[in-house]
Amino acid sequence: MTMDNTPTVAAIWALAGLPEAALAELALTGHDPAVPSSFAVGTAAQASMAAAALAAAELGHARGAPRQRVAVDMAHAAVECTGWFSLDGQAPDLWDAFSGLYRCADGHVRLHANFAHHREGALRLLGLEPATAQRSDAERALLGWRALDFEQATAERGLVATALRSFAQWDATPQAQAVAAQPLLTLTRIGDAPPLALAPLAADAPPLDGVRVLDLTRILAGPVGGRALAALGADVLLVNSPNLPNIAAIADTSQGKRSALVDLRTDAGRAQLSALVRQAHVFSQGYRPGGLAALGYGPEALAALRPGLVCVSLTAYGAQGPWAARRGFDSLLQTAMGFNHAEGEAAGDGKPRPMPMQILDEATGFLMAFGAAAALWRQQREGGSWHVQVSLAQTAHWLRGLGRIAGGLQAPMPDRAPFLETSASGFGLLSAVRPAMRLGRATVGYRHASMPPGSHPPAWT
């Protein structure tokens, strides 16, 4: 059985004003349930990837290459979105011992403790000493808190935790109403500029060949977006801060990229970044709202520095509403926005449970790649500088709108083995899922091995 998800891609496509004729090139195979979930997780994975690949191919067409087939198999896409990888034969544990769902006096909260400062801040809020606390101590302490009170207390301290809500409870919040009023993503022209020079493209060349992307993202959604652009041929330079931590998944999400360190707290670092921006086509960032703007790298300032630039901004809860400035991660949004509760209801036992992968991160990453390629297409035709805005919450709202899958939780996880490839990396021997995006002529893949931050100079090749 195959589902035709072309209409789902077409709805994304229309948001960017791209030519409808390109949709005839889609070849989408497979059907939900692709993984054990009551949500259309497979559709979200397939449609976001297909939109990204098709937009890149359409940009290639604008540069002189004939249109080409864009194929995505749903099972492959779903496996890629699990984010599974191993290093030297060992799959790393991606979750801190204190991360997860906890009972409170009147419900549940989810903690995200993968970064030390978030973990230590939450433990101190609970009256615990981070150096000696055990998870059981946190479990006992949280029984004395109301869920919404703990959520608010962590937000006020710049920490990350959310209360478990049902869909009805989420829908009643002002933030839910703000998210529901926004489209899945936005492309906004923010300045005047002539079309940036992009060389004509050979028929069999990767569609983003010659496109220079600055990737200032760290956690998962943004790095996935940058990796997708690299797989489609872009020259992606990952720019990390030497002062900020990363997660283990950087070994997987750095495939295809070069990786440099730049300290934006110094004059020299800001000079380095400004020099890179002046030759870039895309600037992608997922810092907390306002963080880069305070350093002089907000979208309008970037457009003034590099007229014609495409800026891609990722937030957790969107650019509007009372939670617009809050930090957030996929697992926390699944809890806050009703997905954990809904999966428990679908299972019949009422036990809250997460979706089988961080699909909000993964799909948002591919939507970032779509937005970047689509805005570049617009820039080539119309000129101007552009700002693409995406958020985990808007992706979650979209996923919910794709409907529920009866009996979906009984589906097995697909076998990942047919989709794995192994390569040398700067982190060790990396086994990871190869890209599910396929093009009719050009090869989709990674030109550069995954390397640790600082392995390359902060310069374009």
Image (cartoon, grey):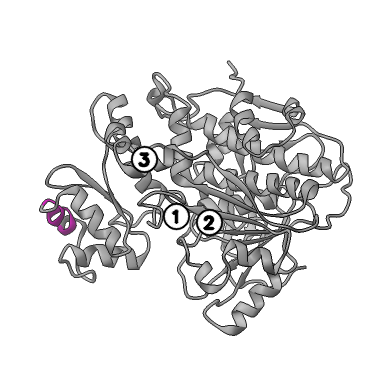
Q: Which mark is residue 92?
A: 1
Q: Give the label on residue 176, or none.
A: 3
Residue at image location 17% in from the left, 62% down from the top: 126
Picture disc at residue 87: 2
User: Magenta region: which residues?
Assistant: 137-143
Residue 21 appears anywhere in the view: yes
**In this rendering, does residue 84 appear at all?**
no
Quadrant of image for the C terminus: bottom right
Closer to the observer: label 3 or label 2?
3
Task: Say above or below: 191 vs 181.
Answer: below
Q: Are marks 1 and 2 in contact (CB under 8 Å)?
A: yes
Q: Quadrant of residue 68?
A: top right
Whole-percent x, y for residue 390 in the image: 53, 47
Choose top left, top right, bottom left or bottom right for residue 52: top right
Foreground: 204 or 17?
Answer: 17
- Distance from the alpha carbon under mark 1 to that under mark 2: 8 Å
Do tag 1 and tag 3 residues touch (Cβ < 8 Å)?
Answer: no
Q: Nearer the viewer, residue 191 or 156?
A: 191
- Residue at the spot 19% in from the left edge and 48% down from the top edge: 147
Question: Which mark is first along the chain, 2 or 3?
Answer: 2
